[in-house]
Amino acid sequence: MPRPFCRRRIAGQPAAPIFKPISIPLLDLEEVVMSLDEFEAIRLADLDGLYQEQAAEQMRVSRATFSRIIESAHRKLADVLVHGKALRIEGGSVQVEGRQCCLLHDAITQSTEEK
């Protein structure tokens, strides 16, 4: 019997949920969807420079699971960059924790809560 799937912990939503090549309408582009846990893995490992073990602890997953998440995220980013596709960041079984990862996300969270 497989192990039950647990929600991954993330620090916050991306500043922009869609990235695309300039001057090409989104409707004309193929999209790649990156889950929020893949986005968080990129942030922890590549932006914050954490080792996989440290990043896995923050997301409350095993190191092996973190390794699979980050590998999938890197593959999707490479596909977007090499083939000029749009990147949409959404979905996944995640739990957003109270703290935010940076001041930019604090401002975004505050502005969306005011609406």
Image (cartoon, rainbow, N blue to C red):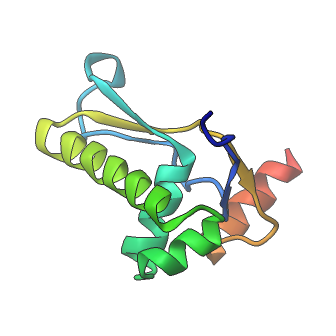
Q: Is residue 46 left or right of residue 80?
A: right
Q: Quadrant of residue 96?
A: bottom right
Outermost residue toward the front in this view: 1
Picture quarter with the C terminus: top right
Residue at horizontal 54 percent and vertical 69 percent from the top = 56
Residue at horizontal 55 percent and vertical 64 percent from the top = 62
Tag count: 0
Q: Is residue 2 above or below residue 39?
A: above
Residue at horizontal 25 percent and vertical 41 percent from the top = 22
Residue at horizontal 56 percent and vertical 47 percent from the top = 36
Q: Residue 103: x, y in percent? A: 65, 76
Query: Nearest the camera: 13 or 22?
Result: 13
Picture quarter with the N terminus: top right
Query: Nearest the camera: 4 or 103?
Result: 4
Q: Residue 18: x, y in percent? A: 45, 40
Outermost residue toward the top in this view: 27
Q: Is residue 86 above or below residue 64?
A: above
Q: Is residue 63 left or right of residue 3?
A: left
Q: Is residue 93 above or below residue 60?
A: above
Q: Quadrant of residue 10?
A: bottom right
Query: Nearest the camera: 99 or 84?
Result: 99
Query: Nearest the camera: 27 or 60?
Result: 60
Q: Residue 11: x, y in percent? A: 67, 65
Q: Residue 92: x, y in percent? A: 60, 38
Outermost residue toward the right in this view: 114
